[in-house]
Amino acid sequence: MQEQVNFEWIKEQFFSNEEKKLALAKGEILLESNQVNNRLFLVTKGKLQGFIKGMELENYPVLEASKNKFIGVYSYFAEGNRSYSRVMAVEDSEVYYYDKPLYDHTNEEMVSLAPFLISVVTNELVARQHFAKKMAMEKRMDVQRLLKAEKMATLGQMAAGLAHELNNSIGVLDGSLDRLRVFISQCIADGHFKDLASFFELGRDKGQQVSSEDARTRRKRYESLMKGLSSSQTRRLSKTGIEPLEIQQLIRKHPSAADRIYDLWEVGCTLYDMQVAATHATHVVKSVKQLGVTEHEWANDVEVNDTIEQALVIVKNLTKRVDTSIRLDENIPKTEACHGQLVQVWINLIKNAIESMIQHGTENPRLIVASTYSDTEIIIQVTDNGPGIPKNIIDRIFEPSFTTKVGGLSFGLGLGLSIVQRIITEHDGEIEVNSEAGNTQFILKLPLIN
Amino acid sequence: MDKLYVLCVDDQREVLNALTQDLEPFETSLMIEECESVNEAWEVMESIDANGDHVAILITDQVMPANTGVDLLKRAKSDPRFQDTRTVLLTGLATHQDTIDAINTAHLDNYVEKPWSKEGIHQIIKVLTTKYLLSKGIDYNEYTEVLDQQTLFETLRKTT
């Protein structure tokens, strides 16, 4: 009675002869391409791959066999017995082989072996089909990755181009604004409005500091104290923040001053707003430029405190709105870093801290920027007493295009913290965030390299 | 003469300033109020109503911290005190869905994109003031400066 032909039986019968066992070290060749082969191999350990030489590709894998899979199926069965690929062990492997040529089998042997041979061949066909599919999928994914990378590169180039163009325009606006400011200030101080110049200066230097709510209560005072003013005049004057008592006499003497005061304050205010907008636009452009380009120079004598001070200059119009303390350790040694990029990091962190406090309406908003160092690293801390980062978003704050700033002129591109992280990673540094309501702290550690 | 208010809501002062500047010509007939948030706007609306005056037109930005313009419009429309208040969404950044919401659930009267034109906003104020006066049955003869003749005639023709 014939025993059942199954894999274990086959293995036992034909692939267990210790004399017909080969050990292959990783990288060793089992079959060369086009080599005559009369053996059917069973892999018992490790992994082998078959490669063909393509036009451009040196070694393109076409088949793969790991434990309990066969190798040499094509060359053993096909006429001519030639291997079409070069088979190499890609791991340390072990194979047993069966080398009785097909034509040496008797008819009875062939009949009893037929199920086995058919199953070997079918399995091999399926395995190769799968392998081909896998390769095709990988190739497709590679192509997609490439396309995406290309798209990002194009975006980066576009962004850099756009940033450059905008920068030129903003530069012109910013410069013209400065000249206008000087000229208008001079005209007002010299001209026949000189008695009212202080109202212009109030607007020019401080902008509108009065909230719409404050304005409404002040407007009531104007309405009750100065009955002669029109509805439009009280509304406008109440926005300047000037108390009715300060200008009551003046307006009583010269009724036309009511409009003049507001007009002059407003001209000043417009200059102030333009300045704020220009600074903001410059910052946005800088952030965008950072996206695609890394043209910053690295140096081995960077003073980290200098980079902090430079950042503070750039965000001055923000820091003056909160109680800002700077505690820099003057003895911090010079280190290897990229000056420009570090400035960008501090700007982003400081801007975030202050904008969140302002937006939230934090009472007594406070910002602390501190630097210190140890033997191996420089530590910079940016602390604020704002609303804190909600627990549900703290894990996402470093993702590009994640933003909480949706309203107003302070809209965000969501690039700030992702840029911070990229730069700190490039410096082999670390970022730590601790946040709760009333105390948010970003701790940055930069390796000290001399 | 009843006091008619136009409420402007935007979290950016620059925008509020520019908008109220454009509305100045109407200040002889209408009261202009500025608010920087939805909550503030709601308080002002309630106090106007409590004084027996009218919130005739509500012009609001969409994207603001905390509540959006559409939130405010919905709230106004579901409150009997502000049923007749005419509404304008003035925005540079409303999504398709925001806009659909504003029209379907807040019964928006007008949608204006930033930057607006002075003439355009003047025309809208006139049309909406006229509609408000007519729906409230207020004597429109006292407000000739802010009336839109065409709206007036058309409405009168339909009702008589």
Image: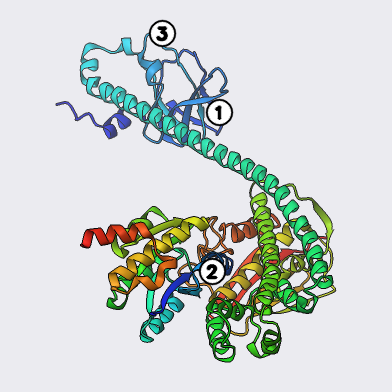
**Nearer to us: label 2 or label 1:** 2
Residue drawn at point x = 31 percent, y = 63 percent: B107
Mark sitting earlier along the chain (3/1): 1
Q: Is residue A67 found left or right of A205 in the rendered image?
A: left
Q: Is residue A358 found left or right of B108 in the rendered image?
A: right
In depth, the one of A3 and A51 nearer the eye is A51
Which dot marks residue A28?
A: 1
Chain ID, mark 1: A
Percent of width and height locating residue A246? 69, 88
Quadrant location of the N terminus of chain A in the rendered image: top left
Q: Secondary structure at mark 3?
A: loop
Chain ID, mark 3: A
Can residue A195 be seen here? The reply is yes
Badge 3: residue crowd in 10 Å (few <14, some 14–19, many ≥20): few
Kindly report the distance in space between the C-alpha atoms of the residues bearing marks 2 and 3.
98 Å
Going by the numbered disc 2, the residue's amino acid type is Glu
Residue pointed to by mark 3? A80
Residue drawn at point x = 62 percent, y = 85 percent: A364
In depth, the one of A367 and B88 nearer the eye is B88
Q: Secondary structure at mark 2?
A: helix
Going by the numbered disc 3, the residue's amino acid type is Gly
Chain ID, mark 2: B
Badge 1: residue crowd in 10 Å (few <14, some 14–19, many ≥20): some
The reply to the same-chain question for discs 3 and 1 is yes
In depth, the one of A126 and A405 nearer the eye is A405
Quarter of the image for residue A109 reads: top left
Residue pointed to by mark 2? B24
